[in-house]
Amino acid sequence: MSDSETVPAATHPEAPGGAPALPQEALEIAAGYAFGGPALDLGALLWDGRCLPDARVRIPLPMLTRHGLVAGATGTGKTKTLQLIAEQLSAQGVPVFLADVKGDVSGVSAPGLPNDKIRSRAAEVHQRWTATGFPAQFYALGGIGHGIPLRATVTSFGPVLLAKVLQLNRTQEQSLGLIFHYADTKGLELVDLKDLRAVVAFLTSEEGRAELKTVGGLSTATAGVILRALTTFEAQGMGPFFGEPEFDTAELTRTARDGRGLVSVLELPAVQDKPQLFSTFLMWLLADLFHDLPEVGDVEKPKLVFFFDEAHLLFDGASKAFLEAITQTVRLIRSKGVGVFFVTQTPKDVPGDVLAQLGNRVQHALRAFTPDDQKALKATVRTFPDSAYDLEELLTGLGTGEAVVTVLSERGAPTPVAATRLRAPESLMGPVDAAELDRAVTSSPLFGRYAQAVDRESAYEKLEAAKARRPAPEAAPMAEQEPRAAKGAPRREESVVEQVVGSGMFKSLARSIGTQIGREITRSIFGTARRRR
């Protein structure tokens, strides 16, 4: 653990002899970050080209649940900023979730390697740098890559997020929601993609069409679009993300034995070419946490801080309803003790209603080589409070590892905008060796719980079994036909699903410990599901 907390904060930096070394504006900025309670140290104030090492720029620990944004052009140091914040959160007992898109965050688990650049940076900001590794757990979507497999059932993932992954339009999304509602109601659990295909195929079959007539039905054309999208999706290798054992997001809120927060790293390099999938899967993790965690209100320190990398991918092509759900989740999850940081290139990548919820800002350099760049620069400047800097000039002149910062004070008010030279992470700034990463994964107590996929009986198997047992119409005995004529009205044939639900096998399964059929399904604002007994 870093001993950086022992460095005293200077409210009024002074030159030798006690004379103020700075103009009043810089003194006021420094005073805005002199917090009394626990805080994270980002770095030292920059003013007029000078680094003022005793004027520390900090974030109050309780304010991390007011969310944040880390932005900047490629190569300006966003990833190292994530690592710096994650280390200090872990050291103060706060669990962290990091999405590692490029594969260079795994080094958080290993001590850093000192070199001249690190020593120089530490001296510039008066940082007592100590090489330190932090407790980490590594995950991979569906087990593709180095990490404990992270899976969700189709039922749990829900129709809203799945529609975004499949790139369905609004009408098709509504039809998918109807399919999920039917499966929920009838106890047909959708564990993997073949379960969903089976239910769609059944609902467009001769015996299944009547099932949805009272709620509008499912057109053959829409069902065809959904089935084709599912086929393409699975052909791209997406099948392993859906199945069991489903990941319990409560694993992300654990601490290590020494009291430090566990850093959960989701390794994504193997699925970099599927950005919409991993961004939507991250939203499932967040929505699931929102659904499960209890209300705690304001807390002395967060229960979890969640870093949402490549955030613009989540918002690209999103429907109005989807954006409203994101906004509501971000607004309300603070009361669950969870902080969310979106990581992207410019603030304009994040919708205004979401951006308005982000109280902590770390803006790295922006480039202004094209008219579009100039427009983005001006838009970024407008998102900051009034400042003592010329932000347009400052943001294009920042070096690597420097940023413009404004956060929420302990009173919840925005701090003055501060140009900051950031501290150096104390863990390894780069990936750990693949063999070492694999050892960390296989030695984890979670490996035995989640590594092996399980394909138990679910909707596909139940519909197939019911179809096999269903007698052909011409084989129906005459004794069954005569009472129909006597009553003057035909007796309605039982649907395949009704046969399944009424069967002794189904009732036995519903009573079994291993199955989730027969539990009440509740869906969140994102349509994600958890069942309670």
Image: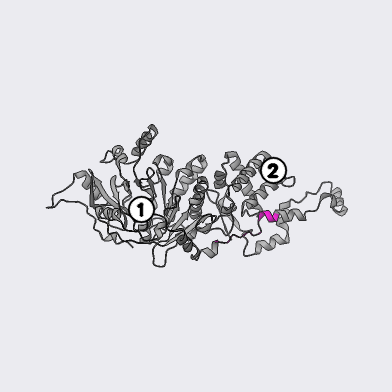
Residue 144 on image: x %, y %: 53, 54
Q: Are marks 2 and 1 in contact (CB under 8 Å)?
A: no
Does residue 332 show up magenta in the picture?
no
Question: Could you tell me which residue is drawn at 23 percent across and 44 percent down?
Answer: 49
- Badge 2 crowding class, 10 Å Cα cut-off, few under 14, some 14 to 19, many 20 or more, is few
Q: CA distance from mark 2 to mark 1?
A: 51 Å
The x, y position of residue 322, in whole percent, is: 51, 43
Instruction: Return the disc, 2 or 1, that comes first in the chain's sequence.
Output: 1
Which mark, by number, is residue 63? 1
Say which amino acid is labelled 2. Lys
| Figure quadrant of the C terminus | bottom right
Q: How is the image coloured?
A: one colour
Q: Which amino acid, mark 1?
A: Met
Q: Which residue does the image show at 73% across and 61% down from the upper left? A: 504
Q: Looking at the image, is 220 positioned above or below residue 113? A: above
- Give the x, y percent position of residue 46: 25, 46
Q: Magenta segment: does it hold 460?
A: yes
Q: Tell me if residue 138 can be seen.
A: yes
Question: Mark 2 against mark 1, which lies toward the viewer?
Answer: 1
Span colored in magenta: 451-462
Q: Quadrant of the N terminus?
A: bottom left
Residue that lies at the very extreme toward the bottom in this rendered image: 257
Q: Residue furthest top?
A: 371
Q: Is residue 444 left or right of 86 when viewed as pictured?
A: right
Q: Which residue is mark 2?
A: 213
Give 119 or 391, whichever is nearer the viewer.
Answer: 119
Q: Secondary structure at mark 1?
A: helix
Spot the residue most to the left. 17
Which is the main secondary structure of the residues drawn in magenta?
loop
